Image (cartoon, helix red, strand yellow):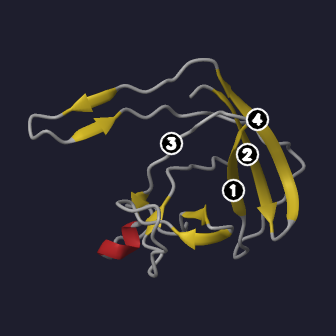
């Protein structure tokens, strides 16, 4: 369902940056493979952060997404490369996908969003580019 998606970059409970992504129409198209498996295409959104944000190595940061109003957004997690013993730069290995379930943050499981996955083996398809 088109609408707005609010995003916030946090360090603990401190909001470092925030914004809104607007989408006036649904922007995905389901594709049915020859095996009957259904997949969808992905759309990347680009957001510019304020230049005065300082991100320190070794610290945890949280990127939170929340639909606004009746808007509905779907994001599919990716399997974390470290699960298969890959390391950076061959795979993204430093993030952990979580979602709200019954009022609390739980590790996301690709096949069942109503299940609190114990290993944290998934991450969201989010890339942070740092310009000099």
- Identify the residue under disc 3: 74
The earlier-in-sequence mark between 2 and 4 is 2
Query: Could you tell me if the residues under marks 2 and 4 are in contact, i.e. CB atoms within 8 Å?
Result: yes
Depth order, front residue of 17/88: 17
Residue 118 shown left or right of residue 81 in the figure: right
Spatial CA distance of label 2 from label 4 is: 6 Å
In this view, the mark in front (4 or 3): 3
The earlier-in-sequence mark between 2 and 3 is 2
Q: Residues within 10 Å of mark 4 (few under 14, many from 20)?
A: some
Query: Could you tell me if the residues under marks 2 and 1 are in contact, i.e. CB atoms within 8 Å?
Result: yes
Mark 3 residue element:
loop
Residue 11 shown left or right of residue 2 in the figure: right
Residue 103 versus residue 126 in the image, above or below: below
Residue under the image location 49 percent in, 24 percent down: 27
Q: Residues within 10 Å of mark 3 (few under 14, many from 20)?
A: few
Picture quadrant where residue 89 is located: bottom left
- Identify the residue under disc 4: 20
Q: Residues within 10 Å of mark 2 (few under 14, many from 20)?
A: some
- Identify the residue under disc 2: 7
Spatial CA distance of label 1 from label 4 is: 13 Å
Indicate the position of residue 47 as horizontal and vertical percent values: 70, 36
Residue under the image location 37 percent in, 32 percent down: 41
Residue under the image location 67 percent in, 49 percent down: 65
- Identify the residue under disc 1: 63
Query: Could you tell me if the residues under marks 1 and 4 are in contact, i.e. CB atoms within 8 Å?
Result: no
């Amino acid at each position: 369902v088109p609408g707005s998606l609010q995003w916030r970059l946090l360090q603990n409970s401190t909001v470092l940056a925030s914004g809104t992504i607007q989408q006036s129409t649904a922007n995905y198209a389901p594709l049915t493979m020859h095996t009957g498996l259904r997949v969808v295409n992905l759309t990347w959104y680009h957001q510019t952060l304020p230049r005065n944000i300082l991100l320190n190595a070794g610290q945890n940061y949280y990127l939170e997404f929340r639909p606004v109003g009746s808007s509905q957004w779907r994001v599919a997690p990716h399997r974390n490369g470290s699960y298969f013993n890959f390391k950076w730069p061959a795979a993204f290995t430093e993030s952990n996908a979580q979602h709200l379930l019954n009022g609390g943050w739980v590790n996301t499981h690709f096949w069942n969003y109503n299940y609190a996955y114990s290993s944290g083996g998934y991450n969201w398809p989010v890339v942070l580019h740092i310009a000099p």
